[in-house]
Structures are given as C-alpha cells and as structure tokens.
Amino acid sequence: MNMTCQEAAKWLEQQEDLLILTHRRPDGDTVGCAVALCLSLRKLGKTAYILTNEDATALFDSYWGDTLAPAGFEPKAVVSVDIASEGLFHKSAEIYKCQVDLAIDHHGSNEGFAQYNCVEPEKAACGEILYTIITEWFPVDADIALPLYLAISTDTGCFVYSNTTPNTHRVAAALMETGIDYAGVNKRHFRTKSYTRLRVESRIIDTMDLHDEGAIALAAVSLRDMAELGATEEDLEDIAAFVGQLKGVRTAVTIRELKPGECKLSLRTGDGLDASKVCALLGGGGHAAAAGCTVMGSVEEAKTSILWAIRQIQNWN
C-alpha cells in the first residue's frame, strides 16, 4: 500500500518501539535519514533505534551518536530508509525481510516490499522525503538538520548531479538556516581525500576502458588493486562519481570486485540512456541517471555484461 508523506507521518506517530534499517554498504543518504528519523521519533517521545550496519565505514562514525540499537532490542515496528529492495538489506537486517512495516525511499525501482511504502522518485534524495515527514511534526532543529543535510548533499554530489531540483535547494537552505556546520559536512565528504584514495584514482585512470570514442568509460577496482594499494572501504567512498568527471564521458561504469566471482557495478549516465533500465537487465535498479547491480563473475565478465546491457538499451531507444 502506498502512502503520502503526511500519511506516513501520522502512521509513525501511532507506533512504539521502532527499529530503523539502512542499506548494504551505507551511504550518506541512508545514514542521514536513519539518524534524523531516529532523533525525531525520540523527540515525539518514542523509543527508536537504528540497527547496527556491519558494512558502515568510519566515515560516518560521528553521525550515529547513541542511536544504534542495543543487543536484545525487540521492535514493534520496522522502518527502512533509502532501500529499494530486500536484496539491499545488510547481513544483520536480513532477519527483517518480509517484516518491514514502512519503507521510505526515492528510487523509481523500489519493489514495494513493505506493508506500507512512501516512495517519491522525483526527490533527489531520500532526505528530502524525511524532511517533509518530520516537518509534519515540528520544525527541524540543528541536531536533526545536520544528518538531513548529509543525506541530501551526498546524494546530489554536493548539488551538482542532474537529480538536483529547486526543491532540493529549498530544503537544503532551510536546513542551513538552523545553524549547522554545512561547510564541515561538505569538506569531509567532498574535499578531503586520503593519499590512498588518490592512488586508487590514479590506478583507475591507468586501467579504464573507453568505448564509443570516449563516451563510455569502464573502470574497475579489483581485490588485487585493493591489496596492492592498501585501500579500505573508506578510501572508496563514492568512487562511482569519479569516472564521470573525465571530459567526453557520458556513461560511466565503476566495477568493484567484492569477493572472487562477485562484482558490484555502479552506472552513471547522461541524457538519452536510462541507467535504471540498463541495470534492471542485470537484476539491479536505481534512478534514470544513477543505478547499480551485482554481477556474479570476474571483473572482465562484469565488463562484458554491463556493456551488453548498455547496448541493449541503446538499441531499444
């Protein structure tokens, strides 16, 4: 059953003992939404926690505070944020498959797995949806505004991605007016890189494959690359955005080898190619300009698979 933001806000007001789920390999949007929702529910007098995500990197440590669920917490209601499908549940969250009461999301590929679904694909970030829900209860304060700003800023590439809308800027402005350290958030997530991260980017440049006279770029980070460079997950945060910065590239693919025989693919596209449709051919999904999927096989097999999928959608168009 679909819900509006207003209906979701009323439903949440009626719940007790809530547990909030984030997605696998969490980004700023799912983390920021979870923290903002948890703090807001507590402000309403509710007991609310976030399920600890074993995939989370140290990059987000400063945002969690005391929101993580203690051992033995038994929720009466389960809410997911920024999760499009049950396949994106992290390991600890898998026990809640088929038990999500409310899914709040902005992916057009959302599978409607929850009992109630508040999904607005036109929003650039799930944080915009959470802002609308929370302001049904009260004006946001700085403690809630900071994680919401994290959510929106990171999912729009610091407001440069094509998904950014006038509403995105209006919400961001309202959050900034609460006095948050927005400059600190943007510096941390967009203007600070480790030496190892720069070495990863150099390796990508040296090994990327270009097709269609440079319009399509396929870049890969293998397990061997990770080991040789001493890279961690934190060093690869938002690496998918890097390849698209190359002049002339309209379709950028970043392939991460997660373990032998399994690769995660992130696709970023320009006008004329729907990234979600491409990734759907390989069992994934997302947005028209940014989507992802997981391919079983080697890095080279993943390259072949995504190039095939791109060609299929190009031909159908």
Image: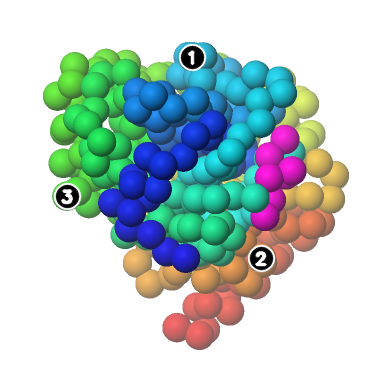
**Left or right: where 296 falls relative to 221:** right
**Camera-nearest residue between 287 and 214:** 287
Mark 1 or 2 closer to N-term?
1
Which residue occupies 71% across, 20% down? 71
Q: Residue furthest right?
A: 260
Residue under label 3: 166
Look at the image and give the residue range highlighted in magenta. Answer: 92-98
**Left or right: where 148 falls relative to 284:** left
Q: Quadrant of the C terminus?
A: bottom left
Task: Look at label 2 and name its amino acid.
Answer: Gly
Mark seen at residue 65: 1
Main SS, magenta residues = helix
Q: Determine whether the residue tagged by mark 1 lies in a helix, strand or loop.
A: loop
The CA distance from mark 1 to mark 2 is: 35 Å
Which residue occupies 41% across, 42% down? 14
Nearest-to-viewer mark from 1 and 2: 1
The CA distance from mark 3 to mark 2 is: 32 Å
Is-magenta flag for residue 180? no
Are the residues flagged by discs 3 and 1 in contact, CB closer than 8 Å? no
**Camera-nearest residue between 130 and 276:** 130
**Camera-nearest residue between 189 and 176:** 176
Which residue occupies 73% across, 50% down? 263
Task: Look at label 1 and name its amino acid.
Answer: Gly
Mark seen at residue 283: 2
The CA distance from mark 3 to mark 1 is: 31 Å
Q: Determine whether the residue tagged by mark 2 lies in a helix, strand or loop.
A: loop
Which residue occupies 45% across, 69% down? 274
Is-magenta flag for residue 93? yes
Quadrant of the rendered image containing residue 202? top right
